[in-house]
Amino acid sequence: MIVAVIDGLGGGIGSQLISQLKASLPAGNEILALGTNSAATYAMVRAGAARGASGENAIRVMVREVDVIVGPLGIIIPNAMMGEITAAMAEAVVTSPAAKLLLPVAQPHVELVGVAAQPLGALIRAAVERVEELAKAERQKA
């Protein structure tokens, strides 16, 4: 299974996701870092991603090649993350055939009604647990 972690700005959320995924997923699963900028990609690769790429085109191409996409909610909202998410990036993520696991991190112009606020650490743990479940289900199919 190939898991893409997408993040922007400094890559803090993505780095935390990758370090926990790397510790939790069995061998044979690949974790990719897809950053909206080189600083985010660099931080995520340092956290343990097998490979990394930066920018709009890298995200548009690679989301078609992965099984799971993990990242903050902003990756599907054009102009989120201080404008780093382009409309093309958001569309590529949303239309990707990959499963999408999005952390409901607060966005200044979007409110998720009915979703209780949780600490970032809890959201990351929940995302990692869900990726583990998906990896286990894929192994059982094989």
Image (cartoon, helix red, strand yellow):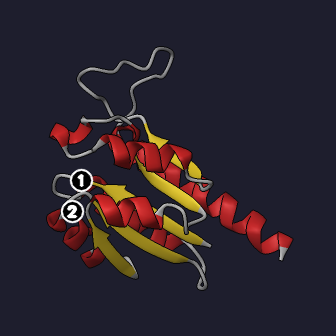
Q: Residue 12 at what x, y percent from top left?
A: 23, 56
Of the 4 image quadrants, the one containing the C terminus is bottom right
Q: Residue 108 at what x, y percent from top left?
A: 23, 23
Can you tell which quarter of the image residue 33 is in? Answer: bottom left
Circle 1 is placed at which residue position? 8
Of the 4 image quadrants, the one containing the N terminus is bottom right
Residue 19 shows up from this direction: no
Which residue is rendered at x = 35% and y = 34% of the image? 77
Which residue is rendered at x = 25% and y = 77% of the image? 46
Kindly identify the amino acid type of the residue bearing the numbered disc 2.
Ala
Residue 45 shows up from this direction: yes
Q: Earlier in the sequence, mark 1 or mark 2?
A: 1
Residue 40 got which mark?
A: 2
Are the residues flagged by discs 1 and 2 in contact, CB closer than 8 Å?
yes
Work out how far the residue at label 1 is from the one at label 2, CA to CA, in angstroms: 5 Å
Q: Residue 54 at what x, y percent from top left?
A: 26, 67
Image: 47 above or below 124: below
* Front-most of residues 60 and 103: 60
Which residue is rendered at x = 60% and y = 79% of the image? 26
Would you say 60 lies left or right of 54 here?
A: right
Regarding mark 2 in the picture, which secondary structure is present there? helix
Query: Circle 1: is it few (<14), some (14-19), or many (20+) Cα within 10 Å?
Result: many
Can you tell which quarter of the image residue 82 is in? Answer: top left
Kindly identify the amino acid type of the residue bearing the numbered disc 1.
Gly
Can you tell which quarter of the image residue 34 is in? Answer: bottom left
